Image: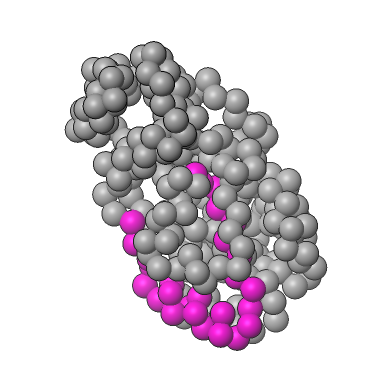
Amino acid sequence: MYKYCIFDLYGTLVDIRTDEEQDFVWEKLALFYGYYGAHYKPSELKAAYKRLTQEAPHLGNEGFSRNINHEAFPEIQIEDVFLSLFKEKSVEADKTLAVHAGQFLRVLSTEYVRLYDGTEEMLRSLKAMGKTLILLSNAQRIFTEYEVKALGILELFDKVFISSDYGVKKPDIRFYEIMLDQCQIPVNEGIMVGNDGICDVQGAKAAGLATLYIYSNLSPKEEKPEADFIVDPMDMKAVQRILEG
């Protein structure tokens, strides 16, 4: 029925739990910065990080915020924040070191990251049928690209769109339009699959796409959206049947 299957990531294909509030996270990250001459007390580093992310030029989506930790300010490039943390201590650092600092924080704050049961099998089956698989995620490339690669599914996507690359995030229609334009997708041939009624359903419907809503453990607490298809509870075999048509 649909040639183009567009997937959200976290809460749709991937289950993740992160917690940046733990003291040891900032103790270890402060030690990392100290290795390069940027000496912070853990509480000072945490406060500076929060200040810099608040000061960063968040673009688009005015009035919209889910406050989801694992997305990590998806409309900015978070590596710029980690670079600024070096500069505030008068330490010259390059983008590569800033990326490594960000990834270190991500690893420290991640309790687990894993595929939902049946996810890989579902994606491989759709791929074998000739479907075009696209990832459209509110996320940070320096985290998400590596997590998807580590989980063994990056190769299954024909195209990956991560919001930090574009300065705009779902449900902003501009993010959808970028994806539709670059992939040359006729809207009647595409379906958005996601676990968020606003970002993945309302946003996709505004762009003219069909929608499949999955209710997962990471779905926001909200009424079920008016999606074309609803899978509740999460069941990847049911998702597969719908997408295979």
User: Which residue lies at the image location 49% right of the left edge and 30% below the top edge?
Assistant: 80
Q: In this picture, which residue range is highlighted in magenta?
A: 113-140
Q: Quadrant of residue 218?
A: bottom left
Residue positioned 45% across, 22% down in the render: 84
Query: On the rendered structure, is 64 left or right of 209?
Result: left
Give 222 or 159, whichever is nearer the viewer: 159
Q: Nearer the viewer, residue 70 or 221?
A: 70
Instruction: Identify the residue at horizontal 80%, vertical 68% (top origin).
Output: 186
x, y percent for residue 38: 30, 19
Is 26 on the left or on the right of 140, as rendered?
A: left
Instruction: Tell which of 242 and 139 is nearer to you.
Output: 139
- Residue 100 in view: yes
Is residue 52 placed above or below 97 in the rendered structure?
Answer: above
Position of residue 81 in the picture relative to residue 151 (left or right): right
Across and down, in percent, residue 156 comes to 52, 71
Question: Residue 243 occupies which quadrant of the picture?
Answer: bottom right
Residue 226: percent from the left, percent from the top?
65, 60
Q: How many marks?
A: 0
The residue depicted at 25 percent of the width and 23 percent of the height is: 34
Q: Nearer the viewer, residue 68 or 89?
A: 89
Query: On the rendered image, what quadrant is the N terminus found in?
Result: bottom right
In the rendered image, residue 48 lying in the magenta stretch gets the answer no
Q: Taking 193 as reference, is 60 above or below it?
A: above
